Each structure stands twice: as C-alpha cells, then as structure tokens.
Image: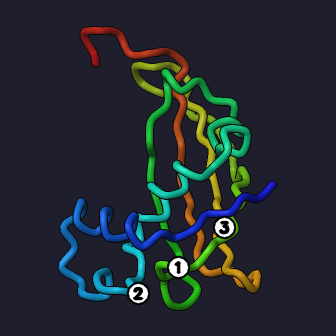
Amino acid sequence: MSYQMPIELGKVREFSRAVKTRNEAHKGANPVIPPTWLCSARTLWEPASESGFAKLGFDLRRVLHGEEEYIFYGPPPRAGQVLTCETRVGERYSKPGKRGGTMRFGELITEFRDESGRLVAEQRSLIIETEKAPKKDEA
C-alpha cells in the first residue's frame, strides 16, 4: 500500500537548519531537499501499518540500525512536490551473534515517486534484530 508525502517548504527549511547545511540549493523559496530529509519526513507521514518495522515483525526493543543508503534517479525532489511512497521488505537472513545470540537482518526498501509516477528516489535500510535484549551492564 502506498501513501502520500507532501514536501513542505517549512519542514525543508527546518531540517536544513537542523543539519546545518551550507548548500545554497537547500535554501530559498524553492529548495531541493537534503538527501536524509526523506527518512525524517517519511516517519511523519508513513501510516503505522505501512511501517517497514511492522512488515519485518521485529521486536523494537532489540532493533539496531545497520546501514542506510539513498539513491536518486535524477534531481532531488523540491519543496512543493508530493511524493507517493511505498515500503517493501527486501532480503532477510540470520547470522550468529557474539553477545546477543542469533541476529536477524531485514532490508527495507522505500520508493519515492513524483506526481507523474516516475521513481525519483529510493531509500534502503538494513535493520538488525538481536535474539536477546542487552543486559543492563552491557548497554
């Protein structure tokens, strides 16, 4: 299932200030988004039922962030656009861990499409779930 994510000028400006960007393209009346804006904005607009975490079924108390990758298929989106987003689960696998038992890995892939349906960006996240929660003295 997909959902809409408007790129609001105020939110782009707020995020640009927060990350202290010096890139002039991220400022002004019609700024392009800083690349990692997609991740932050997505969490505001994504319905809980469409969350990648919900789709993986991982226990959030034992989740680690593995890595993040952004791929842009042309110019970055700008304030004023509305993107259609959809998240799917990619590769899943397990590996033995050292302290937390078996670790489960899940790849989340979110596609961002413009008003014409053209793929403009993709976010790939690797999420890790440990078998056991860390002990207090290990946290």
* Left or right position of 79 against 57: left
What x and y, as percent, mark residue 20?
Answer: 18, 67
Please name the residue that numbered disc 1 is placed on. 80
CA separation in Å, label 3 and label 1: 18 Å
What x and y, as percent, mark residue 111?
Answer: 66, 67
* Left or right position of 45 against 79: right
Residue 134's mark?
none
- Figure disc tally: 3
Farthest residue to the bottom: give it. 74
What x and y, as percent, mark residue 1?
Answer: 81, 54
Dot 3 crowding, Cα within 10 Å, few <14, some 14–19, many 20+: some
- In the image, residue 24 sits, relative to residue 39, either above or below, namely below
What x and y, as percent, mark residue 80?
Answer: 53, 79
- In the image, residue 53 sits, relative to residue 136, either above or below, namely below
* Left or right position of 134 against 79: left
Compare marks 3 and 1 and give the one earlier in the sequence: 1
- In the image, residue 35 sits, relative to residue 55, either above or below, namely below
Please name the residue that numbered disc 2 is placed on. 30
Identify the element where label 2 is drawn. Answer: loop
Amino acid type, residue under disc 3 in the picture = Glu
Residue 14 sits in quarter: bottom left
CA separation in Å, label 1 and label 2: 8 Å
Identify the element where label 1 is drawn. Answer: loop
| Depth order, front residue of 74/63 | 74
Amino acid type, residue under disc 1 in the picture = Gly
Dot 1 crowding, Cα within 10 Å, few <14, some 14–19, many 20+: some
Q: Residue at x 38, y 67 (%)?
A: 10
Residue 111's mark?
3
Farthest residue to the right: give it. 1
- Cβ–Cβ below 8 Å for labels 1 and 2? yes
Residue 19 sits in quarter: bottom left
Q: Residue at x 73, y 54 (%)?
A: 88
